[in-house]
Image (cartoon, rainbow, N blue to C red):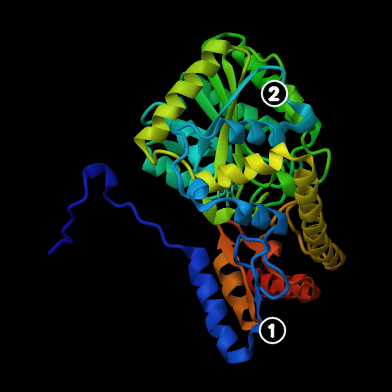
Amino acid sequence: MANYSVLASHSQGKSEVDKIFGVNQAANEKAKIVGKENIINATIGAFLDAKGKLITLPTVEEVMRSLPFDELANYAPISGLPEFIEAAIDFTFQEYRPKAYIKGIATPGGTGAIHHAIWNYTEEGDTYLTHDWYWSPYKTMARETLRKLDTFKTFDENNNFNVQDCLRKVTELAQVQRNVLLIINSPAHNPTGYSLEYEEWESVVNGLKELAQSKKNNLILFVDVAYLDFAPPGSRKFFQLFNDLPENIFVIVGFSMSKGYTMYGYRSGCMIGVSSSESVINEFQAANQFSNRGTWSNGTRSAMRVLAEIHKSPALTEKVNKEREEYRLALEERAKIFTAEAKEIGLEVSPYKAGYFIIVPTTKPDEVALKLQEDNIFLVAMASGVRVAICAIATEKIPGMATKIKKAIDALEG
Ligand SMILES: Cc1ncc(COP(=O)(O)O)c(C=O)c1O
């Protein structure tokens, strides 16, 4: 008898295996046999210290604990606390705030912002675009919202951002759809660690402006900056390219408190709209506030309050930035050790610049990941590479890793 289902037709077949959870489980099982100290568990997408404990920013915790519980536990306004939105906008753009109408809507993490961008700026059945190395929930959300995801090549032959392929795909899609949503995750891209250079951003924006001239399309650029605070100083300059855009290019920046404020589970982010048109920004606010009400209602007040408190005190802001900078440099150090060894032994890795992950391309990702488990190295296999979560491993465990990965690849790829 065929499996009986009570799901509505549009939800038939929806399921997803949590690969990371599975590999992490395998690492924990092996740790019971060989000892935790002998395991390299580079699976988890959270920043961990040398003992495998979640790194949190002490000042963020202090601020949270200083607030009365009835303030933390209360509802937030549907669109978010106004002082939180102001803080999110300010912390995102800093000195590079675009000259434009800018408004924000609080969402549960950056995920909520991506969801609303897809839902409110593409039609049912439409396709939206991102790079071919991408954070897999982009695709989950396409299935969830009855849209499709298509990709362009992330890198060109010199391992630079493939502006040409990106614009080619946007142009092609613009011929069959009125609204074209393009998601770019930079700086500190998950999973390659790439950040677009200012000039690359300039070329993307100029290409979009050219395409916008005919007025046949609306071009929606979603900039996913989930890892912005783990990119080096100077990484915000590209925001100034969003000055004075034509009204049919609409930019949405997805701010997240998960990584930058180590508040992953608090589910707090902000969808920031940037437009030269007052009506576009007003409808942005109205439609996305409506979507908040129609999905998860309001976001987490405690997280919003914490960001607002930090923002209103320059001393707290400085403390948080200093604490985070220390951890950012530690992450940079981990990456340096890994990439230097890779270079020395001739292991190809993604053009890492910043962030939580590095990719090692391979044609046999599943096999390579499995083989490395024999060496007590646990990585997540992706479509055409293995993902090394340097955010999750102690600095002293990194030397030798690249060599073992190369050995596994050489053995399996032949
Ligand atoms: C590329 C990317 N975008 C967005 C997010 C959103 O995270 P959150 O919803 O926790 O803010 C993540 C989290 O892992 C991510 O990796």
In percent of width and height, residue 182 lies at: 57, 31
Q: Is mark 1 within 8 Å of ligand 1?
A: no
Name which residue type carries label 1: Glu
Q: CA distance from mark 2 to mark 1?
A: 47 Å
Residue furthest out toward the left = 1
* Labels 2 & 1 near each other (Cβ < 8 A): no
Compared with residue 409, is residue 259 higher up or lower down, i.e. above or below?
above
Check the image and name the residue furthest to the bottom.
Answer: 33
The numbered mark at residue 205 is 2
Looking at this view, name the residue that lies furthest to the top: 214
- Residue 321 visible in this rendered orientation of the protein: yes
Residue 324 lies, in percent from the top left, at: 76, 53
Tag 1 residue? 37
Q: How busy is the neighbourhood of tag 1: few (under 14 within 10 Å), some, or many (20 plus)?
A: few
Q: Report whether 125 appears left or right of 333.
A: left
* Residue 269 higher or lower than 103, as above or below: below
Q: In the image, 122: left or right of 401?
A: left
Q: Is residue 225 left or right of residue 296?
A: right
Residue at (35% x, 56% y) in the render: 15
**Residue 309 against residue 291 in the figure, above or below:** below
Secondary structure state at the residue bearing disc 2: helix
Disc with the residue nearer the chain's start (2 vs 1): 1
Q: How far from the left and from the top, in percent, is residue 414? A: 67, 71
Residue 346 place in picture, x, y as percent:
82, 64
Given residues 249 and 75, the one toward you in this image is 75
Residue name at image x 68 percent, y 49 percent = 260
Residue 359 shows up from this direction: no
Q: Residues within 10 Å of mark 2 (few under 14, many from 20)?
A: many
Which quadrant, please, contains the N terminus? bottom left
Q: Quadrant of residue 394?
A: bottom right
Q: Secondary structure at mark 1?
A: helix
Q: At 70% across and 22% down in the image, what residue appears?
A: 242
